[in-house]
Image: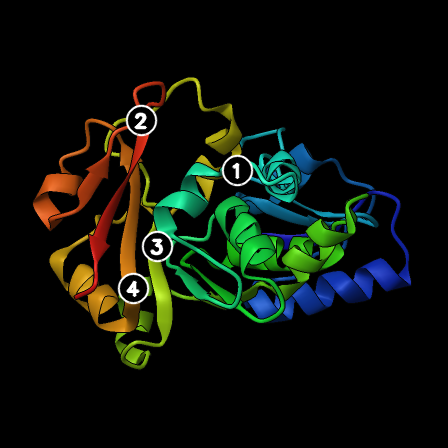
Amino acid sequence: MIVSTAARTNDKLNERAQSAAEQLQEPFVLRKKRSIAALQKAYNTGCLIVGKDRLEYYPFGSAEPFFFHPNSASFRVKRLMRGEVDPFIEAAGLERGMTLLDCTLGLASDSIAASCVVGQEGKVIGIEGNPVLAYIVEQGLKEWESPVAEMNEAMARISIRQGNYRDILPELSDQSADVVYFDPMFTKAISASEGIAPLRHLAVYEELNETAIKEALRIARRRVVLKDHYQSPRFKRFGFKQQIRPASLFHFGIIEVK
């Protein structure tokens, strides 16, 4: 991957792009008015473009960028503020002051909703395995401006750790989070789920295993939660109590910590 700037750049954008390149340990390339396609062809790789308002990642050979957007989190937060039920929050049993460890952060939709619920007294920590995705989402959580103040506050409170959860979980203390959450790539694809389509180029395709579940149970004070396709064998394999949702293609599974 290379890091460059928007076509109409300036010293400030160049400095920001150079900073991003240093953090990601990727080369910074001057744009020189070249198109995205020309950059991809010249360097035979994807491009992270630093613009005035957002970061955009163009996978190699693609003209469509990936960028941070809170997506479904926006209306989920509004529903929560109206006192309505959110399936994830209900499955996780989250309340004000609690701590959530999200092992598969992605676009952070669940973490944003969780941060809204646990409030300033609580904590939401997201782990993301792909360094580019982690960087884009971390910057987006800081810079995205929603007309809803509670949404901005919820996003700003989320802390991110970049790395593989398999490596990070053993480093964490016993009972250091109330809830540990996994939302791995589904064992069966949901073709209608356009919300995660841009994520597929950056997603970490790694199978959940018994060691990770064991670590999660050590870390969790209350429960471990899994989100997966309703036909996924993971629920039974790892001992999750599947929460049946007849109208939904994805279900939550729960293991209560005894």
Circle nearer the viewer, 1 or 3:
3
Q: Which residue is mark 2?
A: 245
Q: Amino acid at mark 3?
A: Tyr
Report if the CB atoms under discs 4 and 3 are less than 8 Å apart. Answer: no
If the image is split into quadrants, where does the C terminus sit? bottom left
Circle nearer the viewer, 4 or 1:
4
Report if the CB atoms under discs 2 and 3 are less than 8 Å apart. Answer: no
- Decide which of tag 2 and tag 3 comes sooner along the chain: 3
- Decide which of tag 4 and tag 3 comes sooner along the chain: 3
Q: Which residue is mark 3?
A: 181
Q: Which residue is mark 1?
A: 60
Residue at image coords 87%, 63%: 12
The x, y position of residue 196, in whole percent, is: 48, 33
- Decide which of tag 1 and tag 2 comes sooner along the chain: 1
**Dot 4: what SS?**
strand
Total numbered circles: 4
- Decide which of tag 4 and tag 1 comes sooner along the chain: 1
Q: Amino acid at mark 4?
A: Arg
Residue in front for this viewpoint, 116 or 158: 116
220 vs 27, left or right, is: left
Q: Report how far apart the C-alphas of labels 1 and 3 lie in the structure.
A: 31 Å
Q: Report how far apart the C-alphas of labels 4 and 1 lie in the structure.
A: 43 Å
Q: Report how far apart the C-alphas of labels 2 and 4 lie in the structure.
A: 22 Å
Residue at image coords 35%, 45%: 91
Q: Which residue is mark 4?
A: 222
- Decide which of tag 1 and tag 3 comes sooner along the chain: 1
Residue in front for this viewpoint, 250 or 165: 250
**Dot 2: what SS?**
loop
**Above-or-below relation of 114 to 21:** above
Residue in front for this viewpoint, 75 or 36: 75
Q: Amino acid at mark 1?
A: Phe
The x, y position of residue 145, in whole percent, is: 79, 49
